[in-house]
Image: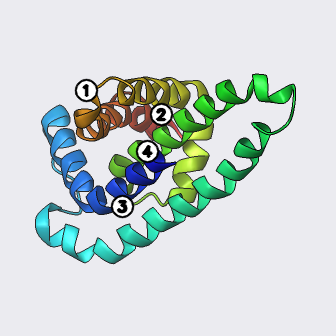
Amino acid sequence: MVFYTFGLVANLIAAPFNALLAEKVELHLTGRPLDEGGGIAKALRELIPTLIDELRKLIYSLLWAAPFLILFLVPGVNLVAPVLWFLYTAWMLALQYIDYPMANHGFKFSAIRSRLRGRRLLGLGFGAATAGMTLVPVLNFIVMPSAVAGATALWVGELQRNEARL
């Protein structure tokens, strides 16, 4: 619980800075700045809405965590509970980090969930890789910026391209 609580609080604090990082990574990948302009001024303007969106993600994750945690108490089912918990963690990490580049394009958390649900295996694969990195000592210190950069590359390479077709 300490690990997850620390991760949630760290993400809450870093959210405005992660949006800036996603913006810069996208600029590097595409060579095009965001249409609505960004930078520090935008980050300050978006501080309160970003924190509210982070709280929505926190509530969503807690609402889904409770049933998964209860599975650990059910005899027989508790044998598969760790696998289900890992899949839950992978999904939550995918939502957490893909949020930054998509929010930079005006997507809200509910729309991000909906879009990622359409590419569930892609999201789970990204989230599983991110979760795996959190388990490696020392590497886990750079997971957050690496995951933001990776999610931005995922947005530019896969999700945004599909967005243009919709």
The residue beneath circle 2 is 162
Percent across and percent down for residue 36 are 23, 63
The residue beneath circle 3 is 12
Residue 146 visible? The answer is no
Q: CA distance from mark 1 to mark 3?
A: 20 Å
The residue beneath circle 4 is 3
* Residue that protrudes farthest toward the right in the picture: 75
Q: Nearer the viewer, mark 3 or mark 2?
A: 3
Residue 158 visible? The answer is yes
- Mark found first going from the N terminus, 4 or 3: 4
- Mark found first going from the N terminus, 2 or 1: 1
Q: Are marks 4 and 3 in contact (CB under 8 Å)?
A: no
Q: Residues within 10 Å of mark 2 (few under 14, many from 20)?
A: few
- Mark found first going from the N terminus, 1 or 3: 3
Q: Residue at x 26, y 54 (%)?
A: 19
Is residue 49 shown left or right of residue 128?
A: left
Is residue 140 shown left or right of residue 1?
A: left
Given the image, on which type of amino acid does mark 3 rest? Leu
Q: Are marks 1 and 3 in contact (CB under 8 Å)?
A: no
Given the image, on which type of amino acid does mark 1 rest? Leu
The residue tagged with tag 2: helix, strand or loop? helix
Is residue 39 shown left or right of residue 163?
A: left
Near-viewer residue (8 or 51):
8
The residue tagged with tag 1: helix, strand or loop? helix
Given the image, on which type of amino acid does mark 2 rest? Asn
The residue beneath circle 1 is 139
Q: Nearer the viewer, mark 2 or mark 4?
A: 4
Q: CA distance from mark 2 to mark 4?
A: 35 Å
